[in-house]
Image (cartoon, rainbow, N blue to C red):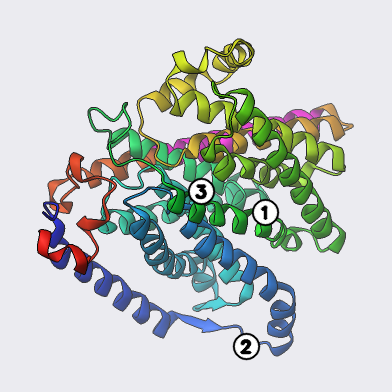
Amino acid sequence: MAPQYAQSLRFRLPPLLFFLQTGFIVVFRFYVDIEQNVQTKQHAFNNYYSEFQDVHVMVILGFGFLATFLVRYSFSGAGFTLLVAAMAVQWAVILNGVESMYHRGKIRINMRSLVVAEMCTASSLIAIGAVLGKTNPVHLLLIALLEISGFVLNGWLLQTFLKVQFLNTIMLLHIFGAFFGLMLSWVLYRQGSEQQHEKEKIDRKTGLFSVMGTLFLWMFWPSFNSVLVEVDHLDRGRSLRAVYSTYLALAVSAVTAAGFSVLTSPQGKLNLFHIQRCTLAGGVAIGVAMSAVHLPWVAMAIGFAAALISTLGSRYIKVHINKFLNCPWAFTISYYCFFIFQPLMLFAFECHDTCGVLSVHGLPGILGWMVQLLLQIADSDDLTMAVRFAVFHICTLLITLSLSMSLGLITGFLLKCNFWRPTQNKKCFDDQAFWEFPHLAGKR
């Protein structure tokens, strides 16, 4: 039998899609133009197109395959990722061009603006990961549009009032998306979610497809972190250094995640979730701290610490604490991690974080923020300047967290309205609520 509310998408999803797409076409018709300077276009094309392809592969293939891990939600994981990304990138282009439209009367698009739009879209997909399987596509579109609006607003506030460099604001996408999604998951919390849902499982086929997403993300992450370096720094060496640092951090992160996955397992075996996601923690952390990292060993140390925090965080959150503490060695580590991350862990226990965005994006992102703060202070010769930087850096994080969590809270209460027809508890993580399965038509 098909899940209840399955046919309600006919009266909600198509009108929303057609309304949004028609509106975007009208906006692009009257207010969007392509960069007319031929030399500028050729320069941008030569510098950004290959990196744009890499970022595009990460957003569509990487996040798309990564979302297929649930045994009965793989169609929705991949399909909804494409749908949301296709709509969100148009919205991001418009929002990022508002300032240009105010000064010039037109939104000028080029390869760089498309790259920035893709990165904003990645932030919304991170947030969606926290509620994956418990929402319908109408919910996901609204989440993406509101999250991107908040993320662009956050970047404008930081650049306008705190004079934060554009690169540093865009790399906060991991922190913003993760805590937006966590607050959203907290508001949409369902009774009984502390126990794993009966359909929240992984089989060999979906697990393999999900690992493919990890491979795409792992391979192209250096481009993701380095593509916008030249926006603030014209020195090509900085871009190359970002590539080297990201690659080394990812390599160390993959090795460290595998090691700690075995050590924290009661059976002494690798955990698929850790291989799928915690191997990417180094890329998250180094992306946030990238502007202050100049030495290879520092990047490698960041990758090690990020994988450690991510693996322990996912084990601590996803598995019952008593099972985890059966390992004496893990008890010592978790004891100290509990006091360091106690507020975050307690907050996470009230959420049902499907994709573990806190341990994969949130905690490594905060680690990168802390490393950047410490390295900038250590490199500063002027105590007054170091103190000023510390104050502004702390304000940057506080503003980002406050805005992301408040908007996640508002979005969550908006989506709780019955008008959006939330999925029934017993029908969560089920493709049959949204997709046609002809071979099951006779069983309904």
Q: Which mark is residue 357?
A: none
| Residue bounds of the magenta highlight | 384-405
User: Image quarter for residue 363?
Assistant: top right
The residue beneath circle 3 is: 154
Relative placement, left or right, of 369 versus 57 is right
Relative placement, left or right, of 335 versus 225 is left
User: Image quarter for residue 286?
Assistant: top right
In the image, residue 226 sits, relative to residue 112, either above or below, namely: above
- Is residue 138 rendered magenta in the image? no
Q: Residues within 10 Å of mark 1 (few under 14, many from 20)?
A: many
Q: From where the camera sits, is residue 372 visible? A: no
State the residue at coordinates (44%, 29%): 318
Q: Earlier in the sequence, mark 2 or mark 1?
A: 2
Q: In the rendering, at what x and y percent does residue 47 appear?
A: 74, 74
Q: Earlier in the sequence, mark 1 or mark 3?
A: 3
Q: Residues within 10 Å of mark 2 (few under 14, many from 20)?
A: few
Q: Amino acid at mark 3?
A: Asn
Q: Secondary structure at mark 2?
A: loop
Q: In the rendering, at what x and y percent does residue 80 appear?
A: 36, 61
Q: Amino acid at mark 1?
A: Leu
Q: From where the camera sits, is residue 399 visible? A: yes
The residue beneath circle 2 is: 36
In the image, residue 32 sits, relative to residue 158, either above or below, namely: below
The quarter of the rendered structure image containing the C terminus is bottom left
Q: In the rendering, at what x and y percent does residue 76 appear?
A: 33, 58
Q: How many angstroms separate mark 1 from mark 3 (CA)?
A: 13 Å
The residue beneath circle 1 is: 167
State the residue at coordinates (45%, 13%): 322
Depth check: give the residue in front, 159 or 224. 224
State the residue at coordinates (55%, 23%): 267
Q: Secondary structure at mark 3?
A: helix
